[in-house]
Structures are given as C-alpha cells and as structure tokens.
Image (tube, rainbow, N blue to C red):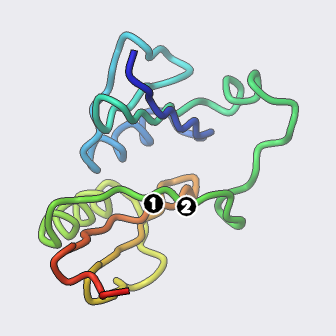
Amino acid sequence: MAKQVFINLAVKDLQKSMDFYTALGFTNNPQFSDDTAKCMVWNESIFVMILTHEKFSSFTTKPIADTKSNIAALFSLSFNSLDEVNNVMTKGLNAGGTEPTPMKDYGFMQQRTIEDFDGHTWELFYMDMNNMPAE
C-alpha cells in the first residue's frame, strides 16, 4: 500500500466546509464520509478529513484550538502555474474563504493565503524551478 497523508480538521459547519474545499479543487470520497465527517481528496495520496467538533473530539483528550484567533498549523498546496493559483484562490474566496495577507512574490515562487470558515490556513503556491536561486 502506498503511503498516504490524512489531515484532520475540526469544523463547525460540515456542509459549508465541504463546499469550500470542493471550490479549492478537492473531491469528496463518499466511502469515508457520513453526517459527522467528509473525506476530501486532493490526490491519490493526500486527504483532508473535515470533522464535526463532536467527531474530532472523539480522537483526542485535548481541547479543540480556536483557529479563528490562533494559528495551529499552515497547510500548503502546490499548483502548476500562477494562473491556477489565482483561479483556485478566486473560487475559494467566492465560496466564503478569506485572504488574510496579500500575495507574496519570492521571484521563483508566488504564494497566496486563504483561510476557511474555521480559520484553518492554506497557502496556495506556484514554484518555478527554472527561477530557483542558485543557493
């Protein structure tokens, strides 16, 4: 079996969150989804599990962080072009996401940041390896 990454996120509104992640380009895998959790697929190896607070709490004894006012993690998604980053960003904003900072341009990499309804922070980026600095 190939190695896979599952990112588990606590969300307050499962349907709104599913719509947001669909707008970013994720697809839902109904086989691992129910009324308490949705399995959102980025590719064959990377999955985001969006879970109701009740479901998420069943996996941990720690309190759920308030990611609207505190950062818990940064998640990054790579794209094949800056146009693709901008297109996905527009779809995410139209689905209710927010852009907390302006685009960053590092010359070889452009990055935009979007937050979902619960404040989970995603960095959408394009990296041009032909423009990578020598060091």
Image side of residue 24 versus residue 12, left or right: left
Residue 113 picture location, percent across and down:
41, 70
Residue 60 picture location, percent across and down:
80, 29
For badge 2, the amino acid type reads Leu
Residue nearest the observer in this picture, 75 or 66? 75
Residue 72 picture location, percent across and down:
68, 58
Residue located 35% across and 56% down the image: 77
- Number of the label disc, if any, that sits on residue 74: 2
- Number of the label disc, if any, that sits on residue 122: 1
Residue located 26% across and 81% down the image: 132
The quadrant where residue 25 appears: top left
Labelled pair 2, 1 in contact (Cβ < 8 Å): yes
For badge 1, the amino acid type reads Trp
The quadrant where residue 99 appears: bottom left
Identify the secondary structure beneath mark 2. strand
Note whether 103 is above or below 67 in the view shown.
Answer: below
Residue located 28% across and 35% down the image: 43
Note whether 8 is above or below 37 in the view shown.
Answer: below
Image side of residue 42 versus residue 85, left or right: right
Identify the secondary structure beneath mark 1. strand
